[in-house]
Amino acid sequence: MKLAKSAKSQKRVLDAAAKMFRDYGYAGTTMRAIADEADLKAGSIYYHYKSKDELITAVLDIGINAVISSVEDALQALPETATGRDRIETAVRAHLSAIIKIGDYTLATRRVFGQVPEAIRLKNTKLRDTYGAIWQKILTDAHARGEFKTDANLTLARLFILGALNWTVEWYKPGGRTIDDVARDFTAVVIDGIANPYGVIHSAADDNQQAQSRAN
């Protein structure tokens, strides 16, 4: 869809703000610097946003709302028969796709969330709580169907999942492993763990000996 001139200008401001907040933090970013990054006159930026607080609020909200929309849409497309594992992998994939697509917004949020005024932080936290509730429902429903251990700590699992997912933007490089690959392997770690299910412990020496035996 083609954006109107005003909408294009607003997007330039937002994209520039996300980049500047990402690089310089909340205190280190000025409205003039954002205008320069957006290649706009300093006064033009105030047409869209009256203050830096309005801008950082918009950047934070865009970041979390993009993830919420991506995950909700992906989950709604699943059949009712989808398992907890299916839902987790789908939500992981949608989350990763969203935060990588809007990388500057995600990285800006990671850098400035603890720096912004409390009122702004509390407002954005409500959106984060809404998203957390989506994940809690995925885990709770799967637990109720007997897909997880009866004593599984679902709150800790949710915090672990979201923390790990949000960190992905720091190391994921396009052109390497696909998002589908990462989502599948991430889900396997969450659901299956990394422990040997048979409880057999091999030493490095045992592994080397087995490798040599196979080579002979």
Image (tube, rainbow, N blue to C red):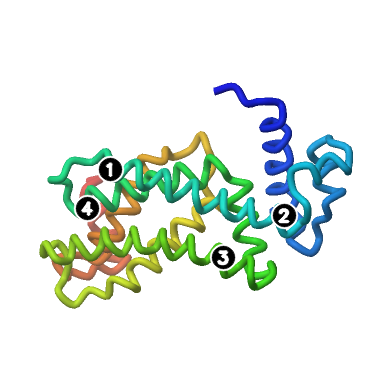
Distance from the alpha carbon under mark 1 to that under mark 4: 15 Å
- Judged by depth in the image, the label closer to the viewer, 3 or 1, is 3
When the figure is inspected, residue 146 is found, relative to residue 73, above or below; the finding is below
When the figure is inspected, residue 211 is found, relative to residue 159, above or below; the finding is above
Q: Residue at x 47, y 62 (%)?
A: 128
| Amino acid type of the residue tagged 4 in the rendering | Arg
**Residue named by callout 4:** 85
When the figure is inspected, residue 132 is found, relative to residue 3, above or below; the finding is below
**Residue named by callout 2:** 21
The front one of 123 and 196 is: 123
Distance from the alpha carbon under mark 2 to that under mark 1: 33 Å
| Amino acid type of the residue tagged 1 in the rendering | Gln
Discs 1, 4 touching: Cβ within 8 Å = no
Left-right relation of 135 to 55: left
Label 4 CA crowd tier, 10 Å (few <14, some 14–19, many 20+): some
Left-right relation of 22 to 139: right
Q: Earlier in the sequence, mark 1 or mark 4?
A: 1
Tell me the element at label 2.
Answer: helix
| Amino acid type of the residue tagged 3 in the rendering | Lys
Left-right relation of 40 to 136: right
Q: In which quarter of the image is the N terminus?
A: top right
Which residue sits furthest bottom? 151
Q: Which of marks 3 and 2 is nearer the N terminus?
A: 2
Please provide percent x and percent y for residue 131. 41, 59
**Residue named by callout 1:** 76
Label 1 CA crowd tier, 10 Å (few <14, some 14–19, many 20+): few
- Judged by depth in the image, the label closer to the viewer, 1 or 4, is 1
Quarter occupied by residue 47? top right
**Residue named by callout 3:** 123
| Amino acid type of the residue tagged 2 in the rendering | Phe
